[in-house]
Amino acid sequence: MELTLKKRNKKTIIPGFSLTLGYTMLYLSIIVILPLSMIFFNTFSMSWSEFYETISHPRAVASYKLTLGTSLGAGLINVVFGTIIAWVLIRYEFPGKKIVDGLVDLPFALPTAVAGIALATLYSPNGWVGQFFDFKIAYSPLGIIIALTFIGLPFVVRTVQPVLQNLSSEVEEASASLGANRIQTFTKVIFPELLPAMITGFSLAFARSLGEYGSIVFIAGNIPMKTEITPLIIMTKLEQYDYVGATAIATVMLIGSFLFLFIINIIQWVTNRKFNQH
Amino acid sequence: MTKPIEVKQDAPIVINRTATKSYALQESAIVKWSLITISLLFLALFLILPLITIFVTALEKGWDTYVASITHPDALAAIKLTLTVVLIVVPLNTIFGVAAAWVITKFNFKGKNLLITLIDLPFAVSPVIAGLIFILLFGAQGLFGDWLFANDIKIVFALPGILLATIFVTFPFVARELIPLMQMQGVTEEEASISLGASGFKTFWLVTLPNIKWGLLYGIILCNARTIGEFGAVSVVSGHIRGLTNTMPLHIEILYNEYQFTAAFAVASLMSILAIITIIIKNIIEWKAKEV
């Protein structure tokens, strides 16, 4: 089967292979490969001690912890509430459902800077929501988590929704007819089906959160060691014309992101295998 | 089966069905409505209230201030620059997306997976890094810095830099929508068209394009929204020159940092209206695509 498929494609009569491949490669080289390789090229021009000193500076290390911690927090909030929202949108009927469903895409469509100033105003100590709390939300790590929750929500909802939609009701009926109650059916039958989608949604939101800048700078307060995220460190270094330092931090971020994607791929491979066994 | 038995069986089955529905196949009304309430509260806190904040703050000082804010020369210059960027970036990315999807879905070749990974790469790269890489290439200390300076070409802190950084962040959107769609549709229709004597371009125009038009439009809409709103990458390469290299998001940032909240939210409200229109078009496309 595979062999015939390949044979047929070798003799394909569809034109445009070299044209489209050439154009794609040219575009990718100019926009992605050449510019991104500059990061590693510039990093290699640094001495190891210089590089290590820059990336292990306490301010930088504090920013890694903050970026990772807030991304994780927002990702977990989104997995829980995103899944509930997806469930509600697929399973229940209520007035205004269509509008709510459309609204979930708002973070994809709304510019991050606009989201940033809106959330900062809303959650600032005298904002509509912020005034009800006697601790700071905006200008604290909590504010960053709120901005990242906003950014990441549609990733989880839009990944879980189709899986929930395609879940056949027969499985649930079978589970119920075998005597399982609703909670058992959910935890033993529905949840395992949803888990891979939840992991995918989480990882998409988390990956986006690691690099997010626009929505955070307005709500974070940007206090060094406390609410300064890693992309902001790069930004600050650039404003001081410290291109070498900015590149070193960028290298750490890139390697971190790639490592994360790699780990997620492994986790997904394992979960898929585990749940496809039966 | 005799009639009396059927009638006898009918009754218990009906009762049974409602019984299973309420206990084992569906959550109780309390659970259902608490989940709905949780969802709506969550969405209100994170999506609806921010949206309302934008419009209320923008109109806080009255309609005249609102109009004055969005017709200020700097605001108009920012709107014009953002439109220029959209008109260049979106068509370029659309052509790229179609070409990339064509080569990936219609042919088998070595390194295809690597190509797909490369297309996905911008999603794993921070927008700030997307800006940084073009500074490293074309900035004063960059690889081509001296040559550009000698030839008096400005890329960074000028329109070309903004375009490059925006393209980096937004080019995957069209390709990502088209690849799974065209993969599903296969190559048979194109092969039929070609073997009947149509040219490659004619085949694309008359066979492929009608099949992918909704997916293509969807990708363009997403690409367009991100292009209008891109902030981090553009912020690095633009240099924030007022009236010259400030896009709408950067203009909002400057106004906000100068405590001109009403003006900042006035421009922000324009972008929010665009975002809402984007969502409406997206839903129309989804609805149309389902019809086909």
Image (spheres, coloured by chain):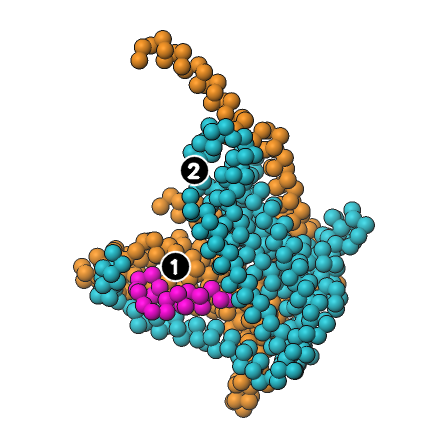
Mark 1 nearby-residue class (10 Å; few <14, some 14–19, many ≥20): many
Relative to residue A5, is residue B35 depicted above or below? above
From where the camera sits, is residue B184 visible? yes
The residue depicted at 32 percent of the width and 68 percent of the height is B109
Disc ID at residue B179: 1
B221 and B122: which is toward the camera: B122
Residue A120 lies, in percent from the top left, at: 71, 57
Question: Which residue is denoted by mark 2 in the rendering?
Answer: A168
Asked whether B117 falls inside the magenta stretch, the response is yes
Tally of numbered discs: 2
Image-based side of B193 in relation to A173, left or right: left
Residue A206 lies, in percent from the top left, at: 58, 58
From where the camera sits, is residue B248 visible? no
Per the model, the C-alpha gap separating discs 1 and 2 is 27 Å
Query: For the residue marked with disc 1, what is the amino acid?
Result: Ile
Image-based side of B116 in relation to A87, left or right: left
